[in-house]
Image (tube, helix red, strand yellow):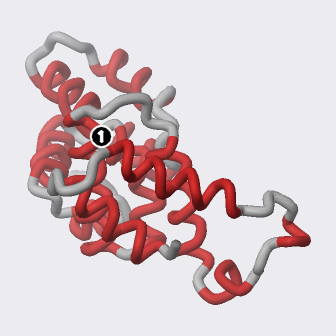
Amino acid sequence: MTLEELTDLLREHAASTVSLSAVQDRLHAVLVADPLDITASDPSRWEMAPDDERLFWRLVYLFESEPEEASRVRELAARVVACLARTGSAATHELLPLLVDQSRFCAIVGRCRDGIISRTGFLSVVAESGYPDYIKLWLQHATPDALVRLCARLDAARYDEIAAGFAVPPG
């Protein structure tokens, strides 16, 4: 299975044409076929497209381990497919922790905006988030308005704008 085939499978799951159990069956076959011993593995995929291969395996383990059929998993599959289409594999790999945490993150931003969660509480969430360091740094310096704009972009699946936005200081 390639990243493109996995993306097609996730797209079908997001569209409710393939169940999570069917996705997991396909991913289980990929895992069983993987020799685990690096000397027995074919290095050509890693040499030709390391970003694709790194994202491929990250997605395999992410979706293979999901315990139940849920709308959350379907939404995540849709986010991953949309992000990959708009940014490519390297940026999708970098944004993946935020995609997985998108709903919770934006709920926290909303609570922070409404004064329910303090700025210190928000910074604590960011510190423990598992996001890449450059995203954490951006979030730590972002104004409340910048965070609201980030969540609006996340909700609109404007992942290319989000990836580009993390490269410049927040407003």
- The front one of 167 and 49 is 49
Residue at 58% x, 71% y: name it. Answer: 53
Circle 1 sits in a helix, a strand or a loop, which is it?
helix
Residue 113 to residue 139: above or below? above
Query: Which of the 4 image quarters holds residue 82?
Result: bottom left
Q: What residue type is labelled 1?
A: Val
On the image, numbered disc 1 is attached to which residue?
73
Toward which corner of the image does residue 43 lie, by quadrant?
Answer: bottom right
Residue 53 appears left or right of 63: right
| Residues packed near mark 1 inside 10 Å, few (<14), some (14 to 19) or many (20 plus) | many
Relative side of 145 to 59, left or right: left
> Hey, which residue is sitting farthest top in the picture?
116
Between 140 and 76, the one nearer to me in the picture: 76
From this view, report whether residue 76 is shown above or below residue 45: above
Q: Front-most of 119 and 9? A: 9
Q: In the image, residue 100 lies at what x, y percent?
A: 36, 42
Q: Residue at x 35, y 16 (%)?
A: 121
> Where residue 70 sits in the image (x, y, percent)?
25, 32
